[in-house]
Image (cartoon, grey):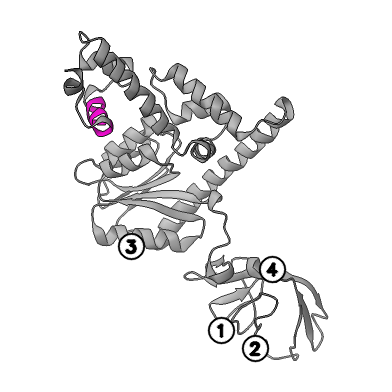
Amino acid sequence: MEYTNRRRRGRKRMASYRVRQRSGLQSREHGEASQPDRRNVFDQRNSRLAVGRHGITQYFHPHAAYLWFRFRVPLWQFIYRRSGGHHWRPIGEGGTSMTNADNAIRIVVAEDEDLIRNNLVKKIESMDSALKVVYAAEDGKSALNYIRDNAADLIVTDIRMPVMDGLELIKSLQSHYPHIRKIITTGYADFEYARQAVRYEASEYLLKPIKTGELQKAIVRVQTSIENEKSMYKKNVAEGLRVNGAVSSEDIVGQVQHYLRENFTKEISLEEISRQFNFTPSYLSKIFIKHTGEAPSKYLISLRINEAKYLLANHPSLSVKEVAERVGYPDQFYFSRLFKQVTGCTPKEYQK
Protein backbone atom coordinates (compact mmCIF):
# COMPACT_ATOMS: atom_id res chain seq x y z
CA MET A 1 0.00 0.00 0.00
CA GLU A 2 1.29 3.47 -0.79
CA TYR A 3 -0.01 6.41 1.15
CA THR A 4 0.51 10.01 0.10
CA ASN A 5 0.52 12.93 2.52
CA ARG A 6 0.62 16.53 1.32
CA ARG A 7 2.13 19.53 3.08
CA ARG A 8 2.13 23.14 1.92
CA ARG A 9 5.30 25.13 2.55
CA GLY A 10 4.93 27.38 5.62
CA ARG A 11 2.05 25.49 7.25
CA LYS A 12 2.65 24.63 10.91
CA ARG A 13 0.90 21.27 10.91
CA MET A 14 0.78 18.36 8.56
CA ALA A 15 -2.59 17.66 6.99
CA SER A 16 -4.59 15.12 8.93
CA TYR A 17 -4.95 11.69 7.46
CA ARG A 18 -6.68 8.45 8.19
CA VAL A 19 -5.31 5.03 7.35
CA ARG A 20 -8.38 2.98 6.61
CA GLN A 21 -8.70 -0.73 7.17
CA ARG A 22 -6.99 -2.30 4.18
CA SER A 23 -5.11 -5.57 3.74
CA GLY A 24 -5.59 -6.43 7.40
CA LEU A 25 -4.30 -3.03 8.61
CA GLN A 26 -6.36 -0.92 10.94
CA SER A 27 -5.34 2.33 12.60
CA ARG A 28 -7.36 5.33 13.72
CA GLU A 29 -4.75 8.02 13.30
CA HIS A 30 -4.99 11.78 12.91
CA GLY A 31 -2.02 14.09 12.61
CA GLU A 32 1.64 13.39 11.95
CA ALA A 33 3.36 10.28 13.17
CA SER A 34 5.89 9.85 15.92
CA GLN A 35 7.58 8.10 18.72
CA PRO A 36 8.89 11.14 20.65
CA ASP A 37 11.50 9.05 22.47
CA ARG A 38 13.42 8.84 19.19
CA ARG A 39 14.97 11.64 17.16
CA ASN A 40 14.10 10.23 13.77
CA VAL A 41 10.33 10.58 14.12
CA PHE A 42 7.79 13.33 13.60
CA ASP A 43 5.95 15.06 16.42
CA GLN A 44 2.46 13.71 17.06
CA ARG A 45 -0.06 16.13 18.57
CA ASN A 46 -3.58 15.01 17.86
CA SER A 47 -3.82 11.38 18.93
CA ARG A 48 -2.60 8.73 21.34
CA LEU A 49 -1.65 6.57 18.34
CA ALA A 50 1.36 7.19 16.10
CA VAL A 51 3.34 5.61 13.27
CA GLY A 52 7.11 5.85 13.68
CA ARG A 53 9.20 7.18 10.79
CA HIS A 54 11.16 3.89 10.77
CA GLY A 55 7.95 2.39 9.33
CA ILE A 56 8.45 4.52 6.22
CA THR A 57 10.44 2.88 3.46
CA GLN A 58 10.68 5.94 1.20
CA TYR A 59 9.89 9.62 1.35
CA PHE A 60 10.46 12.17 -1.38
CA HIS A 61 11.09 15.92 -1.72
CA PRO A 62 11.25 16.78 1.97
CA HIS A 63 11.82 20.46 1.17
CA ALA A 64 9.33 20.76 -1.64
CA ALA A 65 5.72 21.83 -1.45
CA TYR A 66 4.57 18.23 -1.19
CA LEU A 67 5.68 15.18 0.78
CA TRP A 68 5.19 11.62 -0.44
CA PHE A 69 5.36 8.67 1.94
CA ARG A 70 5.47 4.95 1.30
CA PHE A 71 4.66 2.66 4.25
CA ARG A 72 5.39 -1.03 4.70
CA VAL A 73 2.40 -3.27 5.33
CA PRO A 74 1.57 -4.56 7.89
CA LEU A 75 2.30 -1.58 10.09
CA TRP A 76 1.65 -3.15 13.49
CA GLN A 77 5.28 -3.07 14.58
CA PHE A 78 5.50 0.62 13.65
CA ILE A 79 2.34 1.81 15.44
CA TYR A 80 2.79 3.25 18.93
CA ARG A 81 0.40 4.07 21.76
CA ARG A 82 1.07 6.81 24.28
CA SER A 83 1.38 5.15 27.70
CA GLY A 84 1.87 8.25 29.82
CA GLY A 85 3.80 11.49 29.44
CA HIS A 86 6.13 11.30 26.45
CA HIS A 87 6.57 7.55 26.59
CA TRP A 88 5.34 5.47 23.65
CA ARG A 89 5.25 1.72 23.20
CA PRO A 90 4.43 -0.54 20.23
CA ILE A 91 1.00 -2.08 20.03
CA GLY A 92 0.01 -5.28 18.26
CA GLU A 93 -3.04 -6.27 16.26
CA GLY A 94 -6.09 -5.76 18.43
CA GLY A 95 -4.10 -3.39 20.65
CA THR A 96 -1.87 -5.99 22.29
CA SER A 97 1.83 -5.59 22.80
CA MET A 98 4.19 -6.81 20.12
CA THR A 99 6.81 -7.67 22.73
CA ASN A 100 7.65 -11.36 22.85
CA ALA A 101 6.44 -12.81 26.15
CA ASP A 102 9.69 -14.75 26.43
CA ASN A 103 11.58 -11.45 26.66
CA ALA A 104 9.39 -10.01 29.42
CA ILE A 105 10.97 -8.86 32.68
CA ARG A 106 9.07 -10.76 35.41
CA ILE A 107 8.52 -8.59 38.47
CA VAL A 108 7.24 -9.42 41.96
CA VAL A 109 5.88 -6.55 44.07
CA ALA A 110 5.77 -6.88 47.88
CA GLU A 111 3.89 -4.13 49.74
CA ASP A 112 1.46 -4.47 52.66
CA GLU A 113 -0.59 -1.34 51.89
CA ASP A 114 -3.20 -2.15 49.25
CA LEU A 115 -3.35 1.31 47.66
CA ILE A 116 0.43 1.66 47.33
CA ARG A 117 0.76 -1.91 46.05
CA ASN A 118 -1.90 -1.43 43.38
CA ASN A 119 -0.40 1.91 42.30
CA LEU A 120 3.06 0.35 42.03
CA VAL A 121 1.73 -2.41 39.80
CA LYS A 122 -0.04 0.09 37.53
CA LYS A 123 2.96 2.40 37.29
CA ILE A 124 5.41 -0.39 36.49
CA GLU A 125 3.26 -2.03 33.81
CA SER A 126 2.51 1.34 32.16
CA MET A 127 6.23 2.05 31.68
CA ASP A 128 7.02 -0.64 29.14
CA SER A 129 5.17 -3.58 27.62
CA ALA A 130 8.21 -5.73 28.44
CA LEU A 131 7.60 -5.26 32.18
CA LYS A 132 5.21 -7.85 33.63
CA VAL A 133 4.17 -7.87 37.29
CA VAL A 134 3.68 -11.61 37.76
CA TYR A 135 2.76 -11.46 41.46
CA ALA A 136 1.76 -8.81 44.00
CA ALA A 137 2.27 -9.87 47.63
CA GLU A 138 1.15 -8.23 50.87
CA ASP A 139 4.14 -9.50 52.85
CA GLY A 140 7.64 -10.89 52.32
CA LYS A 141 6.76 -14.49 53.11
CA SER A 142 4.08 -14.61 50.42
CA ALA A 143 6.53 -13.15 47.89
CA LEU A 144 9.25 -15.65 48.84
CA ASN A 145 6.84 -18.60 48.58
CA TYR A 146 5.89 -17.49 45.08
CA ILE A 147 9.52 -17.13 44.00
CA ARG A 148 10.38 -20.61 45.28
CA ASP A 149 8.02 -22.10 42.71
CA ASN A 150 8.12 -19.54 39.89
CA ALA A 151 10.72 -17.67 37.87
CA ALA A 152 11.26 -13.96 38.58
CA ASP A 153 13.79 -11.36 37.45
CA LEU A 154 13.13 -8.46 39.82
CA ILE A 155 11.45 -7.79 43.15
CA VAL A 156 10.21 -4.38 44.28
CA THR A 157 9.65 -4.60 48.03
CA ASP A 158 8.80 -2.39 50.96
CA ILE A 159 10.94 -2.77 54.10
CA ARG A 160 8.33 -2.67 56.87
CA MET A 161 5.80 -5.45 56.34
CA PRO A 162 4.11 -8.02 58.61
CA VAL A 163 5.09 -11.72 58.80
CA MET A 164 8.40 -11.20 56.95
CA ASP A 165 9.86 -7.74 56.36
CA GLY A 166 11.64 -6.59 53.24
CA LEU A 167 15.17 -6.89 54.64
CA GLU A 168 14.59 -10.49 55.69
CA LEU A 169 13.12 -11.15 52.25
CA ILE A 170 16.08 -9.77 50.29
CA LYS A 171 18.48 -11.55 52.64
CA SER A 172 16.82 -14.86 51.76
CA LEU A 173 16.79 -13.97 48.06
CA GLN A 174 20.49 -13.12 48.16
CA SER A 175 21.23 -16.53 49.70
CA HIS A 176 19.07 -18.68 47.45
CA TYR A 177 18.20 -16.59 44.36
CA PRO A 178 21.08 -14.10 43.93
CA HIS A 179 20.21 -13.54 40.26
CA ILE A 180 17.00 -11.73 41.22
CA ARG A 181 17.44 -7.95 41.24
CA LYS A 182 16.06 -6.04 44.22
CA ILE A 183 14.54 -2.58 44.50
CA ILE A 184 13.83 -1.42 48.07
CA THR A 185 11.11 1.11 48.94
CA THR A 186 10.70 2.68 52.37
CA GLY A 187 9.13 5.64 54.10
CA TYR A 188 12.12 5.99 56.41
CA ALA A 189 15.42 7.65 55.51
CA ASP A 190 17.29 5.34 57.87
CA PHE A 191 21.02 4.80 57.32
CA GLU A 192 20.87 1.30 58.85
CA TYR A 193 18.20 0.26 56.33
CA ALA A 194 20.32 1.58 53.48
CA ARG A 195 23.42 -0.18 54.84
CA GLN A 196 21.64 -3.54 55.02
CA ALA A 197 20.12 -3.03 51.56
CA VAL A 198 23.64 -2.55 50.17
CA ARG A 199 24.84 -5.61 52.09
CA TYR A 200 22.20 -7.77 50.40
CA GLU A 201 23.01 -6.22 47.02
CA ALA A 202 19.82 -4.24 46.47
CA SER A 203 19.94 -2.61 43.04
CA GLU A 204 18.04 0.53 44.06
CA TYR A 205 16.80 2.23 47.26
CA LEU A 206 13.75 4.50 46.89
CA LEU A 207 12.14 6.73 49.53
CA LYS A 208 8.36 7.09 49.80
CA PRO A 209 6.33 8.76 48.52
CA ILE A 210 7.79 7.27 45.37
CA LYS A 211 8.01 9.69 42.46
CA THR A 212 7.10 8.15 39.13
CA GLY A 213 10.23 9.53 37.46
CA GLU A 214 12.55 8.06 40.10
CA LEU A 215 10.80 4.70 39.93
CA GLN A 216 11.06 4.68 36.14
CA LYS A 217 14.79 5.50 36.21
CA ALA A 218 15.41 2.70 38.73
CA ILE A 219 13.38 0.20 36.70
CA VAL A 220 15.16 1.18 33.46
CA ARG A 221 18.59 0.67 35.05
CA VAL A 222 17.62 -2.78 36.31
CA GLN A 223 15.89 -3.65 33.03
CA THR A 224 19.03 -2.74 31.07
CA SER A 225 21.13 -4.93 33.34
CA ILE A 226 18.75 -7.89 32.93
CA GLU A 227 18.58 -7.49 29.16
CA ASN A 228 22.37 -7.37 28.96
CA GLU A 229 22.52 -10.61 30.92
CA LYS A 230 19.99 -12.23 28.60
CA SER A 231 22.02 -11.19 25.57
CA MET A 232 25.04 -12.87 27.16
CA TYR A 233 23.27 -16.21 27.33
CA LYS A 234 22.57 -16.00 23.62
CA LYS A 235 26.30 -15.62 23.02
CA ASN A 236 26.94 -18.55 25.35
CA VAL A 237 24.44 -20.69 23.46
CA ALA A 238 25.99 -19.78 20.12
CA GLU A 239 29.49 -20.53 21.41
CA GLY A 240 28.33 -23.81 22.93
CA LEU A 241 26.77 -24.89 19.66
CA ARG A 242 29.93 -23.93 17.77
CA VAL A 243 32.17 -25.96 20.09
CA ASN A 244 29.98 -28.91 20.96
CA GLY A 245 27.67 -29.17 18.01
CA ALA A 246 23.89 -28.81 18.12
CA VAL A 247 22.71 -29.47 21.69
CA SER A 248 18.96 -29.35 22.16
CA SER A 249 17.34 -27.64 25.12
CA GLU A 250 15.88 -31.04 26.02
CA ASP A 251 19.43 -32.41 26.36
CA ILE A 252 20.35 -29.50 28.61
CA VAL A 253 17.34 -30.16 30.85
CA GLY A 254 18.32 -33.82 31.08
CA GLN A 255 21.83 -32.83 32.17
CA VAL A 256 20.41 -30.44 34.78
CA GLN A 257 18.15 -33.18 36.17
CA HIS A 258 21.14 -35.53 36.40
CA TYR A 259 23.18 -32.85 38.17
CA LEU A 260 20.38 -32.25 40.69
CA ARG A 261 19.98 -35.97 41.38
CA GLU A 262 23.70 -36.20 42.09
CA ASN A 263 23.91 -33.07 44.24
CA PHE A 264 20.51 -32.49 45.89
CA THR A 265 21.92 -33.22 49.38
CA LYS A 266 24.10 -30.10 49.09
CA GLU A 267 22.96 -26.50 49.42
CA ILE A 268 22.20 -25.63 45.79
CA SER A 269 20.89 -22.41 44.31
CA LEU A 270 19.62 -21.75 40.80
CA GLU A 271 22.58 -19.39 40.37
CA GLU A 272 25.03 -22.22 41.07
CA ILE A 273 23.29 -24.59 38.67
CA SER A 274 23.32 -21.90 35.98
CA ARG A 275 27.05 -21.37 36.41
CA GLN A 276 27.64 -25.10 36.03
CA PHE A 277 25.97 -25.05 32.61
CA ASN A 278 27.09 -21.56 31.54
CA PHE A 279 23.57 -20.17 31.13
CA THR A 280 21.65 -17.41 32.86
CA PRO A 281 19.21 -18.47 35.62
CA SER A 282 16.23 -17.05 33.71
CA TYR A 283 17.02 -19.02 30.55
CA LEU A 284 17.67 -22.24 32.48
CA SER A 285 14.36 -21.88 34.34
CA LYS A 286 12.50 -21.19 31.11
CA ILE A 287 13.68 -24.29 29.24
CA PHE A 288 13.34 -26.48 32.36
CA ILE A 289 9.70 -25.46 32.81
CA LYS A 290 9.07 -25.89 29.07
CA HIS A 291 10.23 -29.53 29.07
CA THR A 292 9.18 -30.69 32.56
CA GLY A 293 6.22 -28.49 33.46
CA GLU A 294 7.86 -27.38 36.72
CA ALA A 295 10.63 -25.05 37.88
CA PRO A 296 14.07 -26.43 38.80
CA SER A 297 13.41 -25.45 42.42
CA LYS A 298 10.26 -27.58 42.48
CA TYR A 299 12.11 -30.55 40.98
CA LEU A 300 14.82 -30.14 43.63
CA ILE A 301 12.21 -30.04 46.41
CA SER A 302 10.66 -33.24 45.07
CA LEU A 303 14.04 -35.03 45.13
CA ARG A 304 14.75 -33.88 48.67
CA ILE A 305 11.34 -34.71 50.11
CA ASN A 306 11.38 -38.20 48.56
CA GLU A 307 14.80 -38.85 50.08
CA ALA A 308 13.59 -37.50 53.43
CA LYS A 309 10.59 -39.85 53.34
CA TYR A 310 12.94 -42.78 52.72
CA LEU A 311 15.22 -41.79 55.62
CA LEU A 312 12.33 -41.22 58.02
CA ALA A 313 10.77 -44.58 57.17
CA ASN A 314 13.95 -46.66 57.16
CA HIS A 315 16.16 -44.92 59.72
CA PRO A 316 13.93 -44.13 62.73
CA SER A 317 16.97 -43.35 64.89
CA LEU A 318 17.66 -40.21 62.86
CA SER A 319 16.33 -36.96 64.28
CA VAL A 320 14.37 -34.53 62.14
CA LYS A 321 17.35 -32.17 62.24
CA GLU A 322 19.68 -34.89 60.94
CA VAL A 323 17.28 -35.83 58.15
CA ALA A 324 16.91 -32.18 57.17
CA GLU A 325 20.68 -31.72 56.94
CA ARG A 326 21.12 -34.93 54.93
CA VAL A 327 18.70 -33.74 52.25
CA GLY A 328 20.15 -30.24 51.95
CA TYR A 329 18.13 -28.21 54.48
CA PRO A 330 20.27 -26.77 57.32
CA ASP A 331 17.15 -25.16 58.82
CA GLN A 332 15.05 -27.98 60.29
CA PHE A 333 12.05 -25.72 60.92
CA TYR A 334 11.88 -24.67 57.29
CA PHE A 335 12.31 -28.32 56.30
CA SER A 336 9.43 -29.37 58.59
CA ARG A 337 7.10 -26.70 57.15
CA LEU A 338 8.02 -27.68 53.60
CA PHE A 339 7.63 -31.40 54.34
CA LYS A 340 4.12 -30.85 55.72
CA GLN A 341 3.22 -28.63 52.78
CA VAL A 342 4.21 -31.39 50.34
CA THR A 343 3.06 -34.53 52.21
CA GLY A 344 0.27 -33.25 54.45
CA CYS A 345 1.99 -34.37 57.66
CA THR A 346 5.01 -33.40 59.73
CA PRO A 347 8.27 -35.40 59.60
CA LYS A 348 7.56 -36.72 63.12
CA GLU A 349 4.09 -37.88 62.11
CA TYR A 350 5.50 -39.55 58.98
CA GLN A 351 8.20 -41.27 61.04
CA LYS A 352 5.57 -42.94 63.21
What crowding class fits label 1: few (fewer than 14 Cα within 10 Å), some (14-19), or many (20 or more)?
few
Q: Earlier in the sequence, mark 1 or mark 3?
A: 1
Q: Percent position (x, y) of residue 158?
A: 29, 49
Q: CA distance from mark 1 to mark 4?
A: 19 Å
Q: Secondary structure at mark 3?
A: helix
Query: Which amino acid, mark 2?
Result: Ser
Q: Quadrant of the N terminus?
A: bottom right
* Residues in magenta, as a range: 334-342
Nearer the observer: mark 3 or 4; the answer is: 3
Q: Position of residue 145 (x, y in %)?
A: 31, 40
The residue identified by callout 2 is 16
Is residue 36 at all visible to an observer of this figure?
A: no
Q: Residue at x 74, y 88 (%)?
A: 7
Sequence-first tag of 3 and 4? 4
**Residue drawn 49% across and 50% down?**
105
Q: Which residue is disc 1 drawn over?
A: 46
Q: Is 338 within the magenta?
A: yes
Looking at the rendered structure, the secondary structure element under dot 2 is: loop
Find the distance from the CA under tag 3 to the CA under tag 2: 36 Å
The residue that label 4 is drawn on is: 40
Nearer to us: label 4 or label 2: 2
Query: Mark 1 belongs to which amino acid?
Result: Asn
Residue 327 locus on image (x, y percent): 33, 18
Viewer-proximal residue, 65 or 32? 32
Of the numbered discs 1 and 2, the one sitting upstream in the chain is 2
